[in-house]
Amino acid sequence: MSDDPLTPPSQKSAPDRTTRRTAAVIPAAGRGVRLGPGAPKALRALGGTPMLIHAVRAMADSRAVSLVVLVAPPDGAAEVKTLLDAHALPERTDFLVVPGGDSRQESVRLGLEALPPEYDIVLVHDAARPLVPVDTVDAVIEAVREGAPAVVPALPLADTVKQVEPAAAPGDPEAVVATPDRSVLRAVQTPQGFDRAVLQRAHATVTEHVTDDASMIEQLGLTVVTVPGHEEAFKVTRPLDLVLAEAVLARRRLNDGF
Ligand code: CTP
Ligand code: MG
């Protein structure tokens, strides 16, 4: 590559820009309490296929992703392995399954610990966001390759947001204390993309006020950047989200038919 006369000198000097290997860690160990009673959320079906299989396919659809680490419910690793074997997945992608922990942060850490050394870009993607399009995944990876230590897909907010004085009991009226300027706020999604060494340092040192993986990088004092998110990367959290997810899948099937 280095003696290729067509490659501009600026790209030749970029560190391993094309050889950096990318893995995706998928935390899928949550119960899904807000979805209501039933199997762990990631194991529930969407369009007849478990949510986590959709999430795995969404990551493996990116040609840059060569390993997917699935973080299974603590007692569900064997079941998840069986599911992976039972569904068609790209040949070029390797898979690992590890049991998760009590918190999402713990589950991500356990996934990172299972990563072989040759991967230096890591995506962290919620199993609960099964329908993220591959273009969003690729945009995140590209921004990390360009040199950002942490990248999040983000969307503008649709609703006006109020800051309140939280009520003592749920459902009680709450006093509004401020209306933040919505134009500088974003709702963030996954996959979030990281320089692997930076994310591991964050997991080794940051333990408090963790809301998402990128917030740990912010606490290290490093810059997190956004790329455009996608409305189909929404998180399946409550029962109504299942209705939306089924509708998105039905629309895709219809479009694929033409
Ligand atoms: N997650 C995880 N380990 C945990 C908790 C959450 O791997 N101990 C994962 C979930 O499986 C999910 C993602 O983190 O893919 C985002 O979490 P969330 O949407 O909150 O899922 P749950 O925690 O399962 O849902 P709930 O909070 O309603 O119980
Ligand atoms: Mg949760």
Image (cartoon, grey):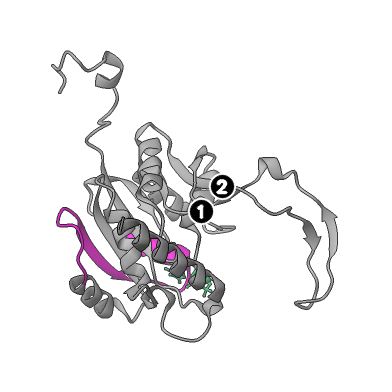
Which numbered tag is attached to residue 131? none
In terms of secondary structure, where does tag 2 sit? strand
- Residue furthest bottom as drawn: 37
Element at label 1: helix
Label number found at residue 231: 1
Image coords of residue 34 (percent x, y) = 56, 77
> Foreground residue, 79 or 256?
256
Mark 1 burial class by Cα count in 10 Å: few <14, some 14-19, many 20+: few
* Image-based side of 85 in relation to 138, left or right: left
Q: Can residue 114 be seen at all in this image of the molecule? A: no
Quarter of the figure with residue 39: bottom left
Question: Pointer 1 and pointer 2: residues touching (CB < 8 Å)?
Answer: yes
Image location of residue 103, percent across then percent down: 48, 69
With respect to residue 15, does 201 lie above or below? below
Q: Residue furthest front?
A: 258
In reply to whether residue 97 is colored magenta, the answer given is yes
Q: Would you say 150 lies left or right of 181 here? A: left
Residue at x 50%, y 49% (from the top left corner): 214
Q: Residue 10: x, y in percent? A: 31, 17
Residue type for callout 1 = Glu
The segment highlighted magenta reads: 87-114
148 and 252: which is toward the camera: 252
Point 51% across, 50% down: residue: 216
Front-lying residue, 115 or 233? 233
In which quadrant of the rendered image does the N terminus lie? top left
Residue 145 in view: yes
What type is the residue that disc 2 sits on?
Leu
Given residues 14 and 205, the one toward you in this image is 14
**Which residue is at a point 53% across and 82% down the rendered structure image?**
36
**Image quadrant containing the C terminus:** bottom left
